[in-house]
Amino acid sequence: MGASRYDEVALSEIADFRNGKGLSPDRYTAAGKYPVFGSNGQIARTNELLNEDWIVVIGRVGAYCGAVHRVFEPSWVTDNAIVARPKPGVDVRYLYYRLSTLNLRATAIGSAQPLVTQGGLNVVRAYHAPPVAQRAIAHILGTLDDKIELNRRMNETLEAMARALFTSWFVD
């Protein structure tokens, strides 16, 4: 892989994939220290730890197979999802954005209950940026995501204030 070129590589060259592990729902707790991720993102919290590092989660089975989620904190990932860990020299935030741009659902097998497999992911080919560009891409897209999240929270606050004003003016 060239130091300044965007080379086309198999995903197996930039990430290691493994299935998550089952976790009984009786291990879920509202005040748990760690988020629990499944095919469609965070589904619960638990005090059990499976992944200490930042990872990327890919929906493995069902309607949300191929969905990509970033997990930038210690976590648990259920067996309904696949964990993607970046290989050395690959920025985990870049890996998240790179995987998000791919149609990973297209690798699914089966129709009634689609299933994304590690083997299917390993052979997907994608252009891969050199380390300096990875950091720049991750920084810019991360900054935009942060701004979007801030705007979403501000909208929630403003909507709550508008509801309170409406209630005080017209209902009370």
Image: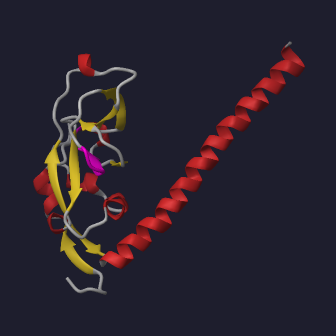
Q: Nearer the viewer, residue 34 or 133?
A: 34
Q: Quadrant of residue 80?
A: top left
Q: Residue at x 57, y 52 (%)?
A: 148
| Residue 25, percent from left and from top | 25, 20
Query: Which of the image's four quarters has the C terminus?
Result: top right
Q: Which residue is outermost to the top?
A: 172
| Residue 146, percent from left and from top | 54, 54
Residue 60 located within the stretch drawn in magenta: yes
Q: Quadrant of residue 119?
A: bottom left
Q: Is residue 149 visible?
A: yes
Residue 164 located within the stretch drawn in magenta: no
Query: Which of the image's four quarters has the N terminus?
Result: bottom left
| Residue 100, percent from left and from top | 36, 58
Q: Nearer the viewer, residue 24 or 8?
A: 24
In the image, taking residue 138 as reference, residue 64 lies left or right, namely left
Q: Which residues are magenta?
A: 52-61
| Residue 51, percent from left and from top | 23, 43
Q: Which residue is outermost to the left?
A: 119
In the image, taking residue 154 as reference, residue 95 lies left or right, namely left
